[in-house]
């Protein structure tokens, strides 16, 4: 755990009346905005990767980031922690555990001590934990993030979400579909829900060869980048692979990712007779390199917000087949930039 240090005054952005090249005395400059991001833990997944990239690229002259992890005590999460950012790990397992009240008090004192200006939360547990505490601590800006269409919401989640509207100053969605889903399920005031789209670091994909430069091996490679979870529709991808294989036995299928569905998918691959043509290589550390070896990239999800995988496929210039979910129709014109399917 990185020690939490007192914030220092650094060179801030120019004011509205500053002139180019003007050097303002350090003592008169406003301090950077102090933003505390709250998330359950870090993982090699879309939202977590986006947050880590955001923290790394923030201009420290303007924004001083902090990262609060409800858990974050596993090696994977710790390995993904960004540098140059104070980290607070709270060790909260279940929100129902009595110890959680002690950690809420610890977080409240931290927010007041560091004079945090903005708290932004990700995922349900972090939002239920972080937003009320930020309100109690007097943090002026309290933001929750919704990067999906709420496919996981239960009636209890909807009621809790509506209660949180009282304590939340702004909600952020990563696409219009996610915004509309949030408005319908939890009914915040529409003017408080904004769309802030995901981005992708194009520099990482500069070295990916175009499809025309792919070596002629005689085997077409169809790939997916996804966590192995039911919402990703990978069982449908395996069924589609079986149909394609029956007509084009030279095609190879690869699903890069890890998760709870691995055993079930391995059994399905075996049942479909695809063992020699289908691979599940596990967690992916180099997405551009993987996509450089793929001809067609697939998104088979039942639900998405703005899919990071889809943005990466586009950045790599791959042929795309995607389900018509979330922001996919906003990114892809069917038959022009890729193929969309219901």
Image (spheres, rainbow, N blue to C red):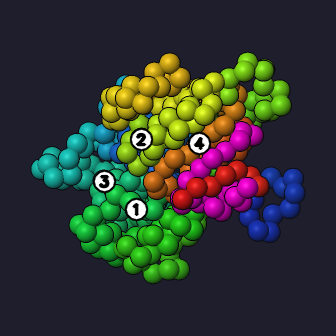
Q: CA distance from mark 2 to mark 1?
A: 21 Å
Q: Which residues are magenta?
A: 317-335
Q: CA distance from mark 3 to mark 1?
A: 14 Å
Q: Nearer the viewer, mark 3 or mark 1?
A: 1
| Circle 1 residues within 10 Å: few <14, some 14–19, many ≥20 | some
> Can residue 308 be seen at all in this image of the molecule?
no
> In the image, residue 31 lies at what x, y percent?
59, 55
| Circle 4 residues within 10 Å: few <14, some 14–19, many ≥20 | many
Q: Nearer the viewer, mark 1 or mark 4?
A: 4
Q: Nearer the viewer, mark 2 or mark 4?
A: 2
Q: Which tag, 3 or 1, sits closer to the chain's start?
A: 3
Q: Nearer the viewer, mark 2 or mark 3?
A: 2
> Can residue 188 be seen at all in this image of the molecule?
yes
Q: Secondary structure at mark 4?
A: strand
> Does 106 sit left or right of 282 as displayed?
left
Check disc 3 and report the residue beneath it.
Answer: 125
Check disc 2 and report the residue beneath it.
Answer: 235
Q: Residue at x 50, y 80 (%)?
A: 190
> Does 335 sit left or right of 269 as displayed?
right
Q: Nearer the viewer, residue 127 or 248?
A: 248
Q: Nearer the viewer, residue 278 or 297?
A: 278
Magenta stretch encompasses residue 239: no
Residue 150 circle label: 1
Check disc 4 and report the residue beneath it.
Answer: 298
Q: Secondary structure at mark 1?
A: loop
> Does 328 sit left or right of 102 as displayed?
right
């Amino acid at each position: 755990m990185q020690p939490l240090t007192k914030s220092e005054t650094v060179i801030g952005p120019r004011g509205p009346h500053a002139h180019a090249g003007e050097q303002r005395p350090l003592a008169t400059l406003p301090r950077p905005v102090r933003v505390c991001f709250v998330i359950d833990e870090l993982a090699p997944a879309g939202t977590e990767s986006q947050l880590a990239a955001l923290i790394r690229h923030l201009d420290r002259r303007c924004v001083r980031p902090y990262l609060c992890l409800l858990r974050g005590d596993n090696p994977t999460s710790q390995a993904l922690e960004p540098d140059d950012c104070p980290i607070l790990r709270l060790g909260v397992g279940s929100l129902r555990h009595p110890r959680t009240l002690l950690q809420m008090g610890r977080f409240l004192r931290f927010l007041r001590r560091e004079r945090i200006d903005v708290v932004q939360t990700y995922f349900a547990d972090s939002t239920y934990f972080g937003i009320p505490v930020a309100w109690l601590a007097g943090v002026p800006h309290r933001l929750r993030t919704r990067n999906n269409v709420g496919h996981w919401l239960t009636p209890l989640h909807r009621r809790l979400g509506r209660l949180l509207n009282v304590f939340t100053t702004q909600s952020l969605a990563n696409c219009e579909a996610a915004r509309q889903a949030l408005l319908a399920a939890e009914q915040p005031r529409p003017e408080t829900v904004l769309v802030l789209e995901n981005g992708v670091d194009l520099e990482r994909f500069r070295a990916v060869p175009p499809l025309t430069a792919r070596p002629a091996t005689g085997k077409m490679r169809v790939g997916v980048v996804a966590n192995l979870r039911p919402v990703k529709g990978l069982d449908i991808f395996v069924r589609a692979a079986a149909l394609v294989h029956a007509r084009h036995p030279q095609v190879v299928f690869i699903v890069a990712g890890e998760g709870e569905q691995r055993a079930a998918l391995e059994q399905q691959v075996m049942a479909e007779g695809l063992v020699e043509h289908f691979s599940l290589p596990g967690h992916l550390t180099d997405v551009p390199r993987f996509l450089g070896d793929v001809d067609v990239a697939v998104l088979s999800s039942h639900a998405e917000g703005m899919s990071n995988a889809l943005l990466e496929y586009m950045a790599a210039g791959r042929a795309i087949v995607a389900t018509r979910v979330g922001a996919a129709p906003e990114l892809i014109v069917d038959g022009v930039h890729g193929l969309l399917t219901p």
